[in-house]
Structure formats: structure tokens, C-alpha cells
Image: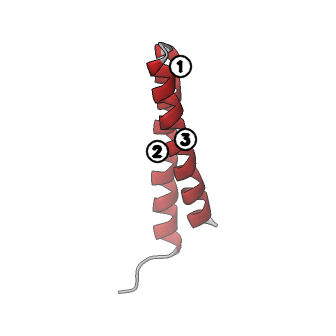
Amino acid sequence: MIEHWIEHNESHIQSFREWALKAKKDGFLEAYEDISEAADKIEEANKSLKKAQKGLFPPPK
């Protein structure tokens, strides 16, 4: 399930970055910053999910 969440989040990150750039291009700089911040936070969430995944499924020794 964690792998699914990570992949799902990655698709959202990509979409958010694309829309942030569109907002910036159209002069909506505050929206650009807010959407970019949201993408950054999802990236942070994925870091936590990856740590959890390693804790649940450590690589074989």
C-alpha cells in the first residue's frame, strides 16, 4: 500500500509543479508559491513514507 501512496503522490507532485508554472506564467506569483509549497510538502510526505517502507520491509542482509 505504501508503494501505491508514494506513486500516487508523485503524480500529484508533477501536476502541482506544472500548474504552479502556469500560474507563474500568467502572473499569479502568490498562487505559484502556494502550489509549489504544496508540492514540496508532498515530497516531504513521500520521504516519510519511504522511511516507513524501509522500516517495514528492510532489505535482506
Q: Residue at x 45, y 28 (%)?
A: 21
Callout 1: few (<14), some (14-19), or many (20+) C-alpha neighbours within 10 Å? some
Under mark 2, the amino acid is Glu
Horizontal side, residue 4 vs residue 18: left or right: right
Give the mark toward the camera: 1 or 2. 1
Give the mark toward the camera: 3 or 2. 3
Under mark 3, the amino acid is Ser
* Location of residue 12 (image quadrant): top right
* Residue 31, numbered label: 1
Q: Which residue is mark 2?
A: 44
Q: Residue at x 41, y 79 (%)?
A: 59
Q: Residue at x 51, y 43 (%)?
A: 13
Q: Residue furthest bottom?
A: 61
Q: Which residue is mark 3?
A: 15
- Reading the chain from its start, which is encountered first: label 1 or label 2? 1
Q: Residue furthest right?
A: 1
Mark 3 to mark 1: distance in Å?
Answer: 14 Å
Horizontal side, residue 18 vs residue 59: left or right: right
Mark 1 to mark 2: distance in Å?
Answer: 20 Å
